[in-house]
Amino acid sequence: MAKMPHGMSRYDIFLKECLHNPEAGGPPLPQTFGYLLDRNPITGNLDRQAIVDAFVCLVDSMKTEELTPGPAEAGQTFFGQFIDHDITLDATSAIGTHTDPATIRNVRTPNLDLDCVYGDGPEATPHLYSPDFEGYLLFGREDNPNDLARNCKGRALIGDPRNDENVLVSQIQGAFIKLHNILMSKVDTDMDVRKAIEHCAEDGIRADVWAEMIPEGLERFEKVRRFIRLHYQWLVLCDFLPSFVDQACIDAALAGDPFGSDAPIMPAEFSVAAYRFGHATVQPVYGISAQIPEAKLFDMAGFGPRSADWNMDMTLFFGPEAQRALPVGPNMAASLFALPPNIVGKGLTWGDIDIPLPQAAKLGLRNILRDRTAIQIPSGQQVARALGLAELPAPQALQDAHITKTPLWFYCLQEAGEKGQGKLTGVGGTIVASVIARLLKLDPESMLHIHGFQPWPGFGDHFSMASLMAYVDAHAGDVECAPALYCGPAHLADDAGAPPIAAE
């Protein structure tokens, strides 16, 4: 068996050694954050209280009761949250205390590799997998076959616990787990599907290495995993990004990197600001199914066993009949201006300034304070200048307080509202598209490095999240061993409940 460098899984080593182009390999992508530009500390003569007051005024100007449907399907907001949990997790920085992003460990691998679903595989994270059916992921409970597998305390057995924080993202997580188990089953029962999976998974890898590098019995698992990873990456690039980002920004990011080849893998400007555009697209109410036609955002409990009543009708979230996300822009639903106590239970401090709970519970203000007090990322105008783009003036609420630099998060939304027709463009579109494109370019096993990659026709003529969800729904019953994969409390306790959706 090949020796494995520290920090790399057996599968990582397998791929690095097996790709036709070994020069494209190298160490894993670094798991720290960084700046695209220079740190942007607060300067000037304004005291901190005046700055906080101006930010509060700016955030309050965003509150809206006018819920105009945007161009994206409602489910794309939560698929975006799922993607975020696949590539970033900052568990250390805190609002009000400056932290150098280069010192922040990114707990997730930055690759678009679905480690939030697979963990580190059956050998390193066996608690995610069936002990009886090799390579199958645990999924479902007796009380709800569509719930995530759980331990005796009701905690989800998944690669990233955040993917159980609300009933929407947890069921996107569940759909990928079900897809894996469906395809594992079909490799044994459907020769055409087996050939398609093997052809796709083996593309770019020498044929003689599977038996040498993969433990006995796991070849089927590894081929299914690579097949799903490649299709997931296609969905991120070709379905999710165009839903929220101007296509011209995507095309430019694929053609070249506007921030240069030495840009950080995971920029703070992306994770702290630009990618948080999704907060502006959240609806206050969603139809879950025919049984639950309206559910308020903070009623969608997570972090515990889920009743079958909350099983989503995916056609309400993806596809032509789906609900719509709000457009990307400088407006946010009023429900995000009073985060519930279990999410924000106390005020904030910034130096000698106390920020009371009613203000600290405003999601937009938390985003801006994280930017300015913790990470201190460049302003929107500074990034625009670096990219050679026309700068937008600071919004009036900031100008009235003599602040000329717009926090990057708000600047990206302002651009989308003024120039992007409900999608990120300019600074915001460039940051988001370039980071996703860079992740795919630097990962030698990604779908960008498979010449002429096309999604499997078995998912439908026009591959998308909608067609993937339709495939999963249509074939969920094909997994004969599904009941043996159940794990968790058989029945909900009378007091079963959990914190509502975590908005951050």
Image (cartoon, rainbow, N blue to C red):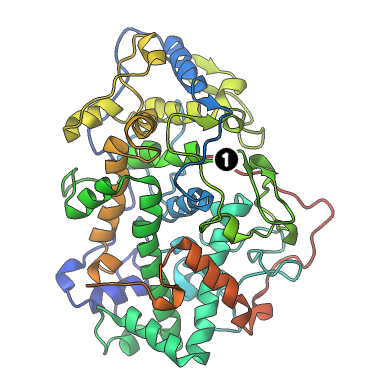
Residue 339 visible to the viewer: yes
Query: For mark 1, what is the residue?
Result: 283
Position of residue 149 measured from the top left corner of the image (x, y, whole percent): 64, 66
Q: Callout 1, which amino acid?
A: Gln
Residue visible at 17% across and 54% down?
A: 255
In front: 12, or 332? 332
Coordinates of residue 46 in the picture (x, y in percent): 36, 8
Q: Relative to the observer, which residue lies in front, 328 or 203?
A: 328
| Percent x, y of residue 59 | 48, 23
Q: Relative to 33, is 128 above or below? A: below
Farthest residue to the right: give it: 494
**Left or right of residue 20, residue 14 in this image:** right
Side of 328 relative to 148 (left or right): left
Left or right of residue 354: residue 31: left
Q: Residue at x 58, y 60 (%)?
A: 315
Number of residue marks: 1
In the image, residue 285 sits, relative to residue 166, either above or below, namely above
Task: Give left or right: position of 183 versus 456.
Answer: right
Packing grade of label 1 (10 A; few <14, some 14-19, many >=20) is many
